Image: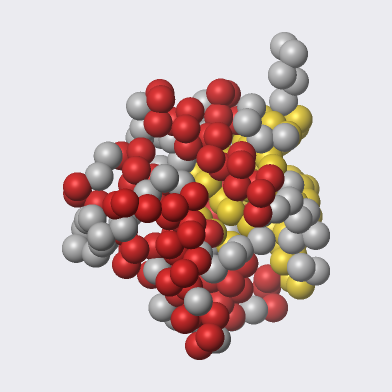
Amino acid sequence: MIIELNKISKSYDNAGLNKRNVLSEISLSISAGDALSIVGPSGSGKSTLLNILGTLDLPTSGLVKINGNEIQNFDDTQLAEIRNNNIGFIFQMHHLLPQFTLIENVLVPTIPLKDKSYKKSAQERAMNLLDSVGLADKIHQRPGQLSGGECQRATVVRALINEPNLVLADEPTGSLDQESAEHLGNLLSDINKKHNVAMVVVTHSLDLAKKMDTVYNLDHGKIEKYNLTK
Ligand code: ADP
């Protein structure tokens, strides 16, 4: 077990004007090596759900547990440390730092690490990972010199650099052309299988969603398994 949501709900109270219930008593548990995707219409709450899974946001009610511990018991510094050690994030935009080279960018999540020897080995991990996503010859280039697909593959490496148990991806192919999107989807699926990293992908693309083992549909605040034979 990595993460467990127990009847979580989320509502936004827009300055008291109109309360909007986005998620409604959702229960979901993610175990080591799981690969799941969440599809649903725009505005259905997919990003909200992913942010709660990543402890970037809190539910209005319900429990979130990481490795059995309720996250309400942790302060912001502890949560940041848990996130940095256990969870890799991939977003729609690559958010690579333009003044840094690829290798420097993928090493950014290692900066706050306290374990000095692990930190030292990060350089070698970065090289191996960049090689595995086909970027070995681009490590000293800056993001502006690379294609969107290459930048997004670098973000996959950045997400994996601290060897997380879980990777959360929010519309990771949303800014890519069809061919790069297909490549990235296959890469995410391979990583899940080879590194045994649990993977949760939020997307409106059914092609990408189907690369994960289980597809959920989020609509009207509820999730249910998506019937792919429909
Ligand atoms: P999706 O990722 O499926 O497009 P989101 O999770 O981004 O959906 O948003 C779900 C709903 O919650 C939308 O109606 C959005 O406007 C609303 N929402 C998201 N974040 C906030 C916020 N910080 N304050 C108020 N409403 C928000």
Residue 197 percent coordinates (x, y):
66, 54
Q: Which residue lies furthest to the front in this view?
A: 137
Residue closest to the eye, 101 or 58 = 101
| Residue 60 x %, y % | 63, 57
Q: In which quarter of the image is residue 221?
A: top right
Classify 224 as above or below 201: above
Residue at image location 40% in from the left, 69% down from the top: 107
Front residue (pair 21, 217): 217
Q: In which quarter of the image is the N terminus?
A: bottom right
Task: Tell which residue pokes out farthest to the top in this image.
Answer: 230
Using the rendered view, name the quadrant where residue 158 is placed. bottom left
Q: In this view, does 221 lie to the left or right of 4?
A: left
The percent position of residue 212, horizontal first and vertical second, equals 66, 35
Query: For the point 63% across and 31% down, which residue is it?
Result: 211
Residue 214 visible within the image: yes
Q: Residue at position x 68%, y 40% from top?
A: 36
